Structures are given as structure tokens and as C-alpha cells.
Image: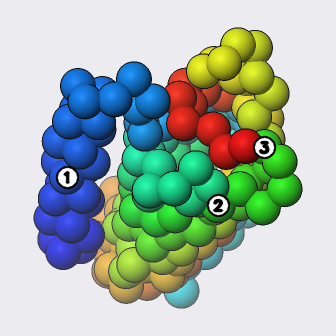
Amino acid sequence: MKWIVRYTLIVAMGWTLAATSAVAQDNASHVYFTGGIGGGRFTPKCDTGCFGTAMNSNSMMLVLGYHMTPRIRGELMWLWQPATGVRSHAASISVGLAAYVVGNLYVRGGVSQLDLSVEDSIGVSEGKSKPGFVVGAGYDLFLSHKFAITPYVNFFSGSIKTLTYDNGGPTVTTSGSVTAISGGISFTYRAWRHQ
């Protein structure tokens, strides 16, 4: 969706400018960044075409955040889940919020744009979603004042209005959905910590 891409770019630029200003003016930067790898599975569903079989996957995550308070931050998050053994993937780009509920344990939620590509024995299905959603949680295990190892779990889901299906003949346009779950370990920079 064009609106979410524009909104994501605006938010990213705003956070980048605000974070740059905060770093320049105050050593207690509000910037948050984490990148991680892990595993998971996703399930594509098509009204016509693909089998709808759950697929095991690897997973990658990148998050850029800006702490508005020590316990609440805005986030721009990218999730990528390439299937193991086949040329298929599910992906999500989202904007949302994360909140620390107890100590270093946080929960997150946001609105996302999903991308799906599934190759199976009868053809290839590809599509992008209407706005979907993403939720997750993690726990920062600090190695120093600003750096942590963070176990995490994420779940995203959304419906796909236009899903193109190609089996070598005429291309079929259908609709469907995707759900995905992943977990892993990320390496985190978090300068502003609550007391």
C-alpha cells in the first residue's frame, strides 16, 4: 500500500532527525536499534491455487526505534522469513509501538504491509497485503550499560486482496492471507533505560 510506505518513510525520517538531535544535545540518546536471526514458520492461504501448507523458515529482524519515554518507544520494523528448501518467503514492514511492562520485558504491536511469495509443485503465488498487524515480545539481557542480547518472538498476519498465481498457463488473480511466527536472538543497542 502506498500510504504505509509514505508513512513509514516520514516516520523513519522524523525518528532519524530527532535521534540525531538528541545524540548531539544529550549523551542519553533515545535511539534504539536491534537486529536478530532465528527461525519460524508461515502459512499461506489462497482462495484458488496454492496448497496452504505451513512452511518452516529462517528469520531475520531489523528494528529502528526512538524512545519517547524510558518505557515506551516508536518502532520501524522489518521481518523477513525465507522458507527452507524452497524459493518462498513471507515478509513484513511495520510501524508501531513497544512498551516495557515489567523490568526489561517488552511487548510490541503495529500495523504492517505484508509480502508473500510461495513456490510449490503446482506453481508460484505472489502478492502484497492490505494493512495487516504484527505483535511480539522480547527481553533485554544487558551485557553493558547500553548493549544487550534480546530473545524475541514475533507474529504477523494479514489478508491479501490481490494474489497472482502462475502455473505456466494463464495467470490467475485470487486472494488469500498469510500468518507467520518467528523467534530468535537479537543484538540490541538501547541507550535510554528506565529506572
State left or right for residue 2 relative to residue 61: left
Q: Where is residue 61 in the image (x, y as percent from the top left)?
A: 55, 37
Q: What residue type is labelled 2?
A: Ala
Which residue is labeled 1 in the image?
Answer: 14
Q: Position of residue 66 (x, y in %)?
A: 41, 47
Disc marking residue 81: none
Which residue is labeled 2 in the image?
Answer: 99
Q: In terms of image quadrants, where is residue 189?
A: top right
In the depicted structure, whether residue 31 falls above or below residue 105: above
Q: Distance between the residues labelled 2 and 3?
A: 10 Å
Quarter of the figure with the N terminus: bottom left
Q: Which of marks 1 and 3 is nearer the N terminus?
A: 1
Residue count near mark 3 (Cα–Cα under 10 Å), binned few <14, some 14–19, many ≥20: some
Q: Which amino acid does label 3 sit on?
A: Asn
In the depicted structure, whether residue 73 falls above or below residue 156: above
Q: What residue type is labelled 1?
A: Gly
Q: Where is residue 158 in the image (x, y as percent from the top left)?
A: 52, 77
Q: Is mark 2 on a helix, strand or loop?
A: strand
Q: How is the image coloured?
A: rainbow
> Mark 2 near mark 3, Cβ–Cβ under 8 Å?
no
Residue 40 visible? The answer is no
State left or right for residue 80 relative to residue 106: left
Which residue is labeled 3 in the image?
Answer: 104
